[in-house]
Structure formats: structure tokens, C-alpha cells
Amino acid sequence: MKTALITKTLFASFSLLALFAPQIAHAQIIPQPWVSVGSQEGDITYSVGARALNLGAELGFGPDGSTGVDVLKFISLPVISPYVGLGYYSADKGFAFSGGVQVGASDNVFVGVGYNSVRGINGQLGVRF
């Protein structure tokens, strides 16, 4: 009798958990690309990136011909999405840290501002599909 009660309780608990667990929205699955332009020590820097499932990757081109990749973690809030990241750059630049925020400007466009220790301060423009 105890086994049957425990089994029913576990089944009901897992059923309710599955019913009320947050679902991944379709918009989070489709990558959201962006481009950015910035400045570090008087040099213009560029990057392209994409975000999906609150994770992102950014390919950046910094001063002195350095090239690198950053891995980003986003925190989704209703209008803004702050992020932090860690990357690695060539040309003896080494590891880089980054952070910033992206803001939804409309249903399909977002803008952002960020800082990268190799690429400096940058502005971002992106699109949602």
C-alpha cells in the first residue's frame, strides 16, 4: 500500500512539474545575429555575433590585427538582456572579458552597448527573426 501511494505521488509530482516547467519560446531557438563597431586605443574594432538559448558567441577583430572569439551568457529580462563573457584573442592579447546590455528597440530590431577588454567600448545593432 505504501509503495502504491509513493508511486502515485511521484507520478503526480512529475506530471505537474512537466506541466508548469518553463518552455523554451520559439524566438529563443532561432539565432539572433548582430554586428558591432567599437574603439580601443584609437583603433576601430569590429565583431559579429549570434545568440540563441541565452548563450552567445562573438567573433571579434581588435587592434594590432588581433582576432578572437568570445563566449557570452545572457540574462533574459522583459526588455533588456545584460550579458557577461570570456574570450581569447591572438596577437599576444590573450584572454578577454566582456559585458554589456542589449535592448529591444522594436519587435525585430535590438541595439546594445558593450565593453570588451581587448576591443574596447562598442555599439551593437541586431535583428530578431
Image (cartoon, rainbow, N blue to C red):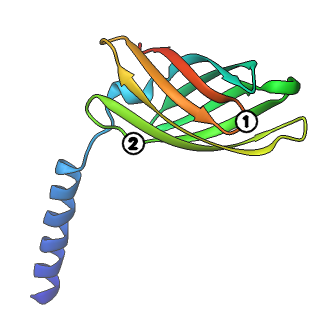
- Label 1 amino acid? Val
Q: In the picture, residue 56 is in which quadrant? A: top right
Residue 96 x/y as whole percent: 71, 43
| Residue 62 position within the rendered picture, expressed as x and y whole percent measured from the top left | 77, 26
Q: Residue at x 19, y 71 (%)?
A: 10
User: Is 49 on the left-hand or right-hand side of 60?
Assistant: left
C-alpha span from label 1 to label 2:
23 Å
State the image coordinates of residue 40 (x, y, percent, origin top left): 71, 27
Crowding near pointer 1: few (<14 within 10 Å), some, many (20+)?
Answer: many
Which mark is in front, 1 or 2? 1
Q: Nearer the viewer, residue 54 or 94?
A: 94
- Residue at 81% x, 25% y: name it: 63
- Asked if disc 1 and disc 2 are in contact, CB closer than 8 Å, the reply is no
**How many numbered callouts?**
2
Q: Residues within 10 Å of mark 2 (few under 14, many from 20)?
A: few
Task: Examine the image and state in which quarter residue 109 appears.
Answer: top left
Quadrant where the N terminus lies? bottom left
**Circle 2 sits on which residue?**
75
- In the rendered structure, find residue 118 and report the number of the disc placed on it: 1
Note whether 57 is above or below 43 in the view shown.
below
Q: Which residue occupies 42% across, 38% down?
A: 82
SS for callout 1: loop
> First in sequence: mark 1 or mark 2?
2
